[in-house]
Image (tube, helix red, strand yellow):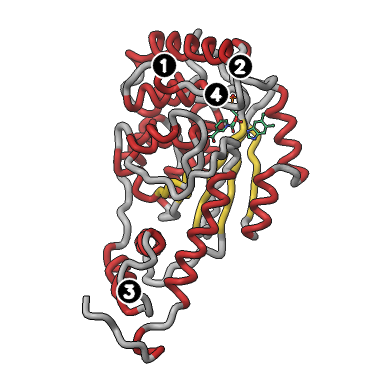
Amino acid sequence: MIAFTDPAAFGDALRNLPAPDADAIVNAAERQAELTKPSGSLGRLEDIALFMAGWQGTACPGVDRIHIAVFAGNHGVAARGVSAFPADVTAQMVANFQAGGAAINALARALSASFAVHALNLDRPTEDIAEGPAMTTEECLAALTAGAASVPADAQLLIVGEMGIANTTPAAALAAIAYGGSAQDWVGRGSGVGAEALDRKARAVAQALALHGPHCTEPFETLRRLGGREIAAMAGAMLAARHARIPVLLDGFIASAALATLAAAHPAVVDHCLAAHRSAEGAHGALLERLGLVPLLDLGMRLGEGSGAAVAAHIVRAALATHGEMATFAEAAVSAGTS
Ligand SMILES: O=C(O)c1ccc[n+]([C@@H]2O[C@H](COP(=O)([O-])O)[C@@H](O)[C@H]2O)c1
Ligand SMILES: Cc1cc2nc[nH]c2cc1C
């Protein structure tokens, strides 16, 4: 497993990203050209099959073993009244995840996916980002490491999700640092806030950007100052997955903000990620555009906890079922076309 022992090790992991297996992609494309269908007729399913082939290093990739890791964290900024829910809901939902009663549990069962929830120091919220850095260096490294340690070496597809009351506030701040723009551009309704809470949220993000912006010169420091434990853990898991060549199905706005923090400095870090969906959080579409990712789904979901990715995983399954199981023109004695 990759270890984030200090910020420099994290920076090294970001600078030395493995590439997909080009031969496997060529071989998968050759197989695709022989399957009993007009070329390109399975649309993005064909792209997904090649993407999975590249990261798994085989012309016939599989997606039986899906792992879903949900990280939970609490946020000092919640005390500013930026969420529609009280901060206690984070721990209450962790208990719900453990009991199997959350949406992601039902979706994990529908996928026969393995599932784990990682509660990260819920009794110690991060500092209010409008007042100071969210985490110490040690706290941020611990969260990154918890994320990296959560990735099973034999997973064929990873979903990282989060639960954290108020976490769309730090996510908006991270998006603004990654891609510019004002607090107003990146804040949204989150768990369903009204106009007054939205205004408090925009002011909290603006204050955080003014305070930390000049110090956010590289991803570790940005995560430490403006992130949260579950956000850093997602970043650590996505980076560890890259080093294990495990493709990632990216969930909603908060997961995307975690990735954006890495991608702003190292754009190639998105290459092992597929965007599952565009969430209903207002700025998610813009964030995905900046990441260069086109979402598979747009279902008006805004739950987080990996739920959008767990729905989109069925599309990945469909892509690999067709790629792996269809007959070739020769096998089925079907005449091939001319182009
Ligand atoms: O995934 C998304 O795009 C998404 C959009 C809005 C809200 N959420 C979830 O709602 C919580 C954050 O909302 P808030 O209003 O408390 O910042 C957190 O637990 C997220 O999982 C998630
Ligand atoms: C109830 C609830 C469930 C969630 N799951 C992920 N984020 C959430 C936020 C709330 C408020």
Q: Is residue 248 left or right of residue 40?
A: right
Labels 4 and 1: the sequence-earlier one: 1
| Position in image of residue 247 (x %, y %) | 44, 53
Q: Nearer the viewer, mark 4 or mark 1?
A: 4
Question: Helix or strand or loop: what does disc 2 sit on?
Answer: helix
Q: Label 4 belongs to which residue?
A: 189
- Amino acid at dot 2: Ala
Q: Label 1 belongs to which residue?
A: 183
Q: Label 3 belongs to which residue?
A: 38
Question: Helix or strand or loop: what does disc 1 sit on?
Answer: helix
- Circle 3 Cα neighbour tier, 10 Å, few/some/many (<14 / 14–19 / ≥20): few
Labels 1 and 2: the sequence-earlier one: 2
Q: Label 2 belongs to which residue?
A: 78
- Amino acid at dot 1: Ala
- Residue nearest the observer in this picture, 322 or 171: 322
Q: Is residue 192 left or right of residue 280?
A: right
Residue drawn 44% across the image and 8% down it? 207
- Residue nearest the observer in this picture, 121 or 206: 206
Marks 3/2: CA–CA distance:
53 Å
Cβ of mark 1 under 8 Å from ligand 1: the answer is: no
Marks 4/1: CA–CA distance:
13 Å
Q: Nearer the viewer, mark 1 or mark 2?
A: 1
Q: Quadrant of ligand 1?
A: top right
| Position in image of residue 173 (x %, y %) | 43, 21
